[in-house]
């Protein structure tokens, strides 16, 4: 049995940091659960020193905008050693060995918390979004890589070492492509369904179809990423729509295994790639309903309701947990 985290809701204003592989979103969530400050900046391609400097700057701007903030929470794309409060594995950013929680606590003088970004996102959706009130939740966040989060028996499941719910590295095809991150596997979910995977598929489609709308857009300098593929698919481009259908079918196949293992109340799909909506989730649901075991195939698959703010809002809730742990009155 996993005890629910003793995190009060709406106790104080908190800073939430969603540090993604491509972008950094820093916001402040007020006592009503409303986002009252939000800034987005680039995180991709930065050195460790540049990343820390930008993080310091963005948190400083949040504190200037909302001087009544009581705590800070960080959701980071890495495995967090909860005992040492360090990132020990990160596929997309130079975070390994950085004492981020201690650094932010010292910088701000406020209670601070750090956790995996997938944990932050699923916590937000379970408290305030698509899985509100659910006892058992599986969540995948489809972005540059794939994050995962689990709520089991009402509380975050982190595992023995704090490294649980790396669902993006659940292998579904041992002969599949290599993981685009530092994961040593082939055919894991991240290798097949992430934004990076979609971009690679788009490049192959452009090479194979030089007269397509996708190729013409790339010739004008457009980046062949998920946003372009989704835009063209909505405009009726069959090649782009086909790419999303392929991604969706792969996603449904992966979700089948996760549902058969965890038997959740709900599966939530978040991250930037899910902006494709039913172009992606429609094929995923069809594949899931065909493959999942009889009880589990009834599990609803829902898009995250909090959208790109989920990780940031979840990080702010983690900040409330740090406040409660410190025994500070909100």
Image (cartoon, rainbow, N blue to C red):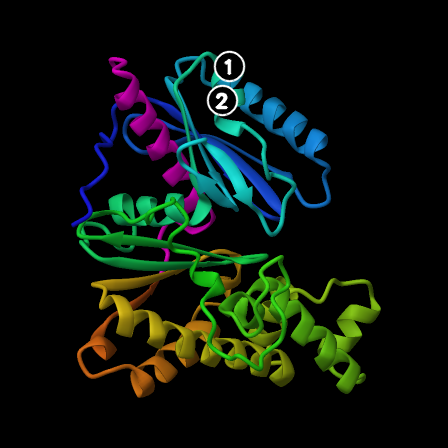
Which mark identifies residue 137?
A: none
Q: Is residue 174 something that shows in the picture?
A: yes
Decide which of 171, 214 is in the foreground and name it: 171
Look at mark 2 in the image and give the residue it sits on.
Answer: 102
Task: Give the left or right position of residue 94, taking residue 11 as reference.
Answer: right
Residue 196 x %, y %:
63, 63
Pointer 2 local density, CA inside 10 Å: few below 14, some 14–19, many at least 20: some
- Residue at 33% x, 25% y: name it: 322
Which mark identifies residue 106?
A: 1
In which quadrant of the rendered view does residue 13 lie?
top left
Image height check: is 35 above or below 168? above
Q: Quick check: marks 2 and 1 in contact, CB under 8 Å? A: yes
User: Magenta segment range?
Assistant: 303-330
Decide which of 220, 197 is in the foreground and name it: 197
In which quadrant of the rendered view does residue 293 lie?
bottom left
Decide which of 205, 218 is in the foreground and name it: 205
Q: Quadrant of the C terminus?
A: top left
């Amino acid at each position: 049995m996993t005890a629910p985290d003793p995190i009060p809701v709406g106790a104080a204003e908190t800073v939430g940091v969603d540090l993604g592989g491509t972008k950094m979103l820093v916001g402040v969530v007020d006592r009503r659960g409303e986002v009252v400050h939000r800034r987005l900046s680039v995180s991709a391609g930065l050195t460790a020193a540049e990343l820390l400097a930008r993080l310091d700057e963005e948190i400083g701007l949040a504190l200037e905008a909302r001087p009544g903030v009581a705590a800070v929470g960080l959701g980071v794309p890495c495995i967090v050693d909860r005992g040492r409060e360090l990132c020990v594995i990160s596929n997309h950013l130079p975070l390994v060995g950085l004492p981020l929680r201690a650094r932010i606590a010292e910088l701000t003088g406020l209670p601070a918390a750090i956790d995996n970004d997938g944990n932050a996102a699923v916590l937000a959706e379970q408290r305030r979004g698509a899985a509100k009130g659910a006892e058992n939740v599986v969540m995948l966040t489809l972005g540059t890589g794939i994050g995962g989060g689990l709520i089991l028996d009402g509380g975050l499941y982190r595992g023995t070492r704090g490294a649980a719910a790396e669902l993006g590295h659940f292998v579904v095809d041992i002969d599949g492509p290599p993981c685009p991150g530092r994961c040593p596997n082939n055919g894991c979910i991240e290798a097949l369904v992430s934004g990076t995977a979609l971009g690679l598929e788009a490049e192959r489609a452009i090479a194979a179809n030089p007269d397509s709308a996708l190729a013409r857009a790339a010739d004008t300098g457009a980046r062949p990423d998920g946003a372009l593929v989704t835009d063209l698919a909505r405009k009726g481009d069959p090649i782009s729509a086909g790419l999303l259908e392929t991604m969706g079918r792969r996603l449904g196949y992966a979700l089948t295994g996760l549902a058969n293992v965890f038997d959740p109340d709900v599966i939530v799909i978040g991250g930037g790639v899910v902006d494709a909506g039913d172009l992606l989730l429609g094929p995923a649901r069809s594949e899931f309903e065909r493959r999942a075991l009889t009880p589990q195939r009834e599990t609803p698959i829902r898009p995250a309701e909090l959208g790109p703010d989920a990780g940031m809002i979840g990080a702010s809730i983690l900040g409330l947990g740090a406040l409660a742990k410190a025994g500070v009155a909100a």
